[in-house]
Image (tube, rainbow, N blue to C red):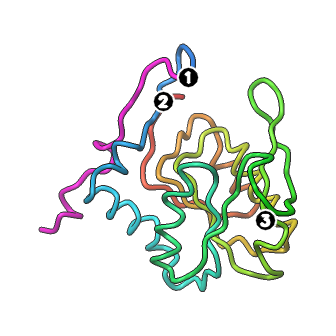
Amino acid sequence: MTVQDTVDLKDLVRTIPDYPKDGILFRDITTLLGDADGLRICVERLTAPYLDASVDAVAGIEARGFILGGAVAEKLGCGFVPIRKKGKLPWKAIGQDYELEYGVDVIEIHEDAIRHGERVLMIDDLIATGGTAEAAVKLLAKLDAVVVGAAFVIDLPDLGGRARVEKLGIECHTLMEFEGE
């Protein structure tokens, strides 16, 4: 039996009640990231479906998507591209709006981050309502990327984000689910 067989990644996720607001159970992966075996297994499992997908770049969504995306890019032997909140990138960027519970926000990518037709894997820690992930897919489409998939550590299926992204024709890969919000 290997370590990978004995580690339950779900056990390494900390749940914080009433954060960032009352009634929310925040799924905190920093405890998973801090566990050497957990991090290694997580990255291996996020990477596995894409080993033969000829991925040219991994696009990670700020901020935990940077940690995971960089590790997955290294495993796939490709580059990493950050998708950041508006105003955080130092070079010419293009943006995509997305709706928040109360208002609108914008994510951005450098306009030269992806070349036409490059095969891109999108990574983030969690998919909830899918607003940020949907915006990231649309942002990558503006650069004529071919999004080969979207991988997340956690899916909150009750919030419908995975279905929202899959409706765009993007296959989602998740490692675990938590019920509720």
Name the foreground residue: 18 vs 95.
Answer: 95
- Inspect the magenta stretch and tell me whether residue 179 lies in it: no
Tell me, for residue 20, which label it has, or none. Answer: 1
- Inspect the magenta stretch and tell me whether residue 14 lies in it: yes
Q: Earlier in the sequence, mark 2 or mark 3?
A: 2
Crowd band around label 2 with a 10 angstrom C-alpha radius: few (<14), some (14–19), many (20+):
some
The picture places residue 19, in percent across and down from the top left corner, at 51, 22
Against 57, residue 107 (above or below) is above
Q: Is residue 47 left or right of residue 162?
A: left
The picture places residue 170, in percent across and down from the top left corner, at 69, 63
- Secondary structure at badge 1 equals loop
Residue 128 falls in which quadrant of the image? top right
Residue at which label 2 appears? 26
Alpha carbon distance from label 2 to label 3: 28 Å
Start and end of the magenta stretch?
1-20
Q: Quadrant location of the C terminus?
A: top right
Q: Earlier in the sequence, mark 1 or mark 2?
A: 1
1 and 2 marks in contact (CB < 8 Å): yes
Tell me, for residue 140, which label it has, or none. Answer: 3
- Secondary structure at badge 3 equals helix
